Image: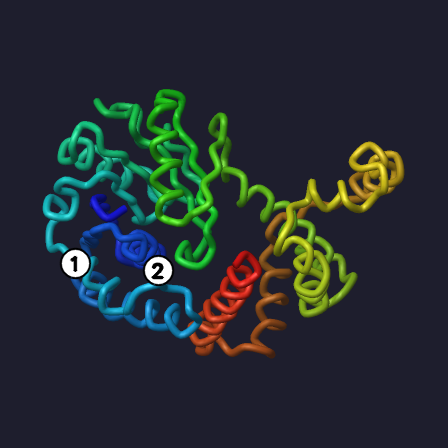
Amino acid sequence: MQTKTTAVIGAGRIGRAWAIVFARSGATVRIYDACEDMLKGALPAIRQSVEDLASFGLVDEPVDAIVARITACSTLEEAVADAALVQENIAEVVEAKRTLFADLDRLVEPDALLASSTSGLPASTFTKELHGRARCFVGHPVNPPSLVPLVELCGAPWTSPEALERAREFYEQAGQKPVILRREIAGFLLNRLQGAVLDEALSLYEQGYTTAADLDTVMRDGLAMRWSFMGPFETIDLNAPGGVPDYASRYRDTYRNIAATRMPFDWGAETLDELDAERRTVLSRDRIEERSRWRDRRLMALLAHRRSLME
């Protein structure tokens, strides 16, 4: 990545984390935000995050060397000049993305890749009219991408396979774990899986089966113990001596019965207010940012542990 220049558009949490991802892999990074205050705070926040990574042994260079590769730019033109890949991280507003991608398509080199970090907007909703639409795609990360390596690559119907393969190689060189969707779908893969679990958890809570704290325990100290190092398909494959067919013969009726009694959650305000009140008894609203940083440091510890197992 030493010869790569990457532009990060949007200096919020996701944008700053992407800047770290690219810079620690050796790339030159230029970051831009239309909000001057957001841009001004980007480098100090990035330095603090890299210092935290260093404290867990998760970077291979001095903090100064990594941060020095990142430049805050006052104009979009400056940020994207000579960029091999542009990672957009602005608000989830389709018109805003459409306008920005039109500017990017005009400003960048013909072979530059244009990626959006959108959590749910298909690339087809904001790239259709672009001359260079074949190099546009969604590069959806998990927050924060500097700690969680998955990135979902999802093109529009007109995105070229060659662009997606170049993107896969680019993110792999940056230390991420890219997956490619074969076609567009709302929410991509991770949010659909997360949404299914969240929908059922909220439904069980609304129906009064248990508390929010106990449902969190079920996930944290139950499913997540296995899912932190293997996925659901490997899980069922290992949970029956005969693999997947054996698992299905044992449990298909159980899961069919569960599905027949499932009640989707409609995001009712009364239940959400009740959930929020329960959460506030264990974490006051003014401590959410503090707890978020604690979460990031726990992710760092987990990442360091996983890395040690591979050595």
Q: Which image quadrant for residue 80?
A: top left
Give me the disc on residue 29.
none
Badge 2 marks a residue whose secondary structure is: helix
Mark in front: 1 vs 2:
1
Distance Cα–Cα, label 1 vs label 2: 15 Å
CA neighbours of label 1 inside 10 A, class few (<14), some (14 to 19), many (20+): some
Instruction: Quickly name the residue at label 2.
Output: 13
Asked if 103 appears above or below 52 in the picture, the reply is above
Q: Position of residue 48 (x, y in %)?
A: 31, 72
> Depth check: 43 or 63 in front?
63
Give me the disc on residue 72.
1
What's the amino acid at mark 1? Answer: Ala
Asked if 12 appears above or below 293 in the picture, the reply is above
Q: Position of residue 13 (x, y in %)?
A: 35, 60
Q: Position of residue 84 (x, y in %)?
A: 22, 38
CA neighbours of label 2 inside 10 A, class few (<14), some (14 to 19), many (20+): some
Q: Which image quadrant for residue 97?
A: top left
> Depth check: 122 or 206 in front?
122
Q: Residue at x 31, y 53 (%)?
A: 25
Badge 1 marks a residue whose secondary structure is: strand
Judged left or right of residue 91, residue 181 is right
Q: Position of residue 191 (x, y in %)?
A: 53, 45
> Depth check: 219 or 179 in front?
179
Judged left or right of residue 79, residue 171 is right
First-in-chain label (1 vs 2): 2
Asked if 249 appears above or below 221 in the picture, the reply is above
What's the amino acid at mark 2? Answer: Arg
